[in-house]
Image (spheres, rainbow, N blue to C red):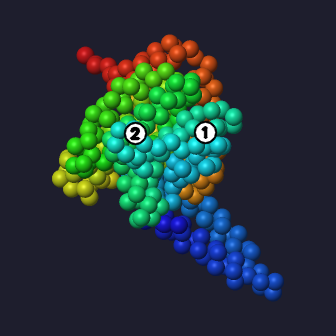
Amino acid sequence: MSKLEFEKPIVELEAKINDLRQMGSKRVTLEPEIKRLESKLDKLKQDVYNNLSAWQRVQIARHPGRPYTLDYIKFITDEFLELHGDRLFADDFSIVGGFAKIDGQKVMIIGHQKGRDTKENVKRNFGCAHPEGYRKAMRLMRLAAKFHTPVICLIDTPGAYPGIGAEERGQAQAIAENLRDMSTVETPVIATIIGEGGSGGALGIAVADRVLILEHAYYSVISPEGCASILWRSSLKAPEAAKALRLHGEDLIKFHVVDEIIPEPLGGAHRNPEETAASLKAALLKNLKKLTSLSTKDLLEERYNKFRDIGQFIEKK
């Protein structure tokens, strides 16, 4: 598993413990030393992961071993049937979606998908969707509404693809139409930021009745590097930008941008994907139960008010 710079002491201690386990035998017991090091490792993990900076948490959100949309679909759903294409231009592999069941509850699940290696990342465009990806997502949401099926969106993208071809095919319009149409789609919608939630690329499938976020995921109007390049003329200032942007769950809850933080295992979702998926599943089922009990009129009214409340402030005289 790839290691981040601040994780090196932890990885080195884990390797030492593994070496001692392999060296041990019936004649020579190293158990006391192993237990001592394991105790030291537990304390080190607590010290490191409970005092992460905003930039370190961004790095965890981008960890290559972190679970992606298709991983969560495998862990939490049954009978997933993937649907393809926007019926206008092409199928965008950076957004996947289809019908599935979560503990018997029928849902339409849609999300960004990154690749695990260079070949797959080229195919998935590093999770950066084209206009046809957002149009596919909206097509699937309308299909879900037709069959009174709740929609679950899993968000993990640095941002929408900014290439010339995407712009020529109407990238900005595709995202804008999603923002408009998601605000009135007549079925419950839950969005969860599972990794990166960058700019309009994330917002394009995040206009939802409930917006959840994993503990170390981030949701921001711009990436830390992009912000640093604009304000400081240097992407090297990304750690300062990450802190200033206040892009993690604790601050987003205060700003009413997200509704709930889903806890991750110590060290991040990549250290225990199954445990993270179980927490995600529990949060989704809890919110689905509440949302499916509402009438369509109440659902749309609450969704409207939710987004109208974002950004309110009080001026002190």
Q: Give the Cα distance between marks 1 and 2.
A: 19 Å
- As drawn, which residue projects farthest toward the bottom? 27
> Circles 1 and 2: CB distance less than 8 Å?
no
Residue pictured at 66% horizontal, 64% vertical: 39
Q: Where does residue 273 sit, x and y in percent of width and height? A: 59, 53
Residue to which mark 2 is pinned: 86
Left or right: 106 in relation to 89: right
Q: Where does residue 71 sit, x and y in percent of width and height? A: 56, 52
Q: In the depicted view, which residue is nearer to us: 177 or 302? A: 177
- Which quadrant of the view contains residue 295? top right
Q: In the depicted view, which residue is nearer to us: 199 or 70? A: 70
Left or right: 18 in relation to 44: right
- In the depicted structure, whether residue 266 falls above or below residue 146: below
- In the depicted structure, whether residue 173 falls above or below residue 120: above
Residue 75 shows in this picture? yes
Residue to which mark 1 is pinned: 100
Residue pictured at 58% horizontal, 43% vertical: 81
Q: Where does residue 250 sit, x and y in percent of width and height? A: 46, 38
Residue pictured at 21% horizontal, 56% vertical: 234
Q: Residues within 10 Å of mark 2 (few under 14, many from 20)?
A: some
